[in-house]
Image: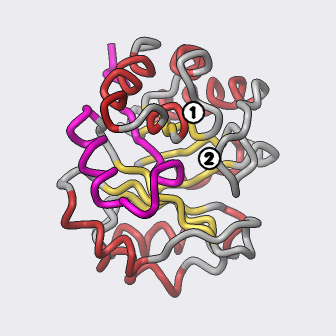
């Protein structure tokens, strides 16, 4: 059985203590640190950019799983590589040449990922399956934390899992949005092997993080 990896989303952390929060979830057993970059244009929210990520890089050796909800993407790829991103995930809708963008991400030394919004069909990722290391299924509409899991996305997770398995490639299947101890087992059963969780990890303070992460993994 594949070990389910947990990627705490720092969007739900205490931004006044970001470095400490990252160190705490790393010590609690996180596998990745998930970082949401939003531009107030592609999605209706503003978060952080490459300079903040670069300053956080020294807080942990865990991979930085950076989800770009920005448009355009290409002018900033090198900035995120320089900041220390390990995985860089983009949306097909964020630019006209997805294949070229993914090639540029890999050339910059990062693992390329593609994110699918709830209304984005799984078929959009099929032409670039050979060029990605991660596919992210959004189980909420991107932009804000704390939303409820959209159950219809379970079918998309199943579809993407079948597509990945057919390639024989080791492509991570990540789910983000409304992931908690109740929805995590459903996502895992559908084929997800990386779970992004914000509120479900960061609630209760640092002393609760290890138990929160363990509760999410139980679905696997």
Element carrying mark 2:
helix
What residue is shown with label 1? 163
Q: Residue at x 72, y 41 (%)?
A: 140
- Place of residue 113 in the rendered image (x, y in percent of width and height, measured from the top left): 48, 55
Image: 153 above or below 107? above
Q: Secondary structure at mark 1?
A: helix
Quadrant where the C terminus lies? top left
Q: Residue at x 55, y 38 (%)?
A: 199
Q: Observer-nearest residue: 144 or 188?
A: 144
- Magenta highlight on residue 24: yes
- Reading the image, the residue beneath label 2 is 126
Q: Nearer the viewer, residue 156 or 123?
A: 156
Instruction: State whether residue 177 is above or below residue 67.
Output: above
The relative height of residue 140 versus residue 99 in the rendered view (above or below) is above
Rendering coords of residue 64 (x, y %)? 33, 57
Count residues near mark 2 (Cα–Cα under 10 Å), then give few for <14, some for 14-19, many for 20+: few
The stretch of residues the image draws in magenta is 1-29
Q: Is residue 131 visible?
A: no
Q: Is residue 160 visible?
A: yes
| Residue furthest to the right | 119
Is 136 part of what is drawn in magenta?
Answer: no
């Amino acid at each position: 059985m594949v070990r389910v990896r947990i990627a705490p989303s720092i969007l739900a952390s205490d931004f006044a203590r970001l470095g400490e929060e990252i160190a705490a979830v790393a010590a609690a057993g996180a596998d990745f640190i998930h970082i949401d970059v939003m531009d107030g244009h592609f999605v209706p929210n503003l978060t952080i950019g490459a300079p903040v990520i670069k300053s956080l890089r020294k807080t942990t050796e865990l991979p930085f799983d950076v989800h770009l909800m920005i448009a355009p993407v290409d002018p900033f790829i090198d900035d995120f590589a320089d900041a220390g991103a390990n995985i860089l995930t983009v949306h097909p809708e964020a630019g006209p040449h997805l294949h070229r963008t993914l090639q540029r991400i890999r050339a910059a030394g990062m693992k390329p990922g593609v994110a699918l919004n709830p209304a984005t069909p799984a078929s959009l990722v099929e032409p670039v399956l050979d060029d990605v290391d991660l596919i992210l299924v959004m189980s909420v509409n991107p932009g804000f934390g704390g939303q409820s899991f959209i159950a219809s996305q379970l079918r998309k997770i199943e579809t993407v899992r079948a597509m990945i398995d057919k390639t024989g490639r080791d492509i991570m299947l990540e789910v983000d949005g409304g992931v908690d101890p109740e929805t995590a087992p459903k996502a895992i059963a559908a084929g997800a092997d990386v779970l992004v969780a914000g509120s479900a990890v960061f609630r209760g303070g640092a002393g609760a993080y290890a138990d929160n992460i363990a509760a999410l993994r139980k679905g696997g």
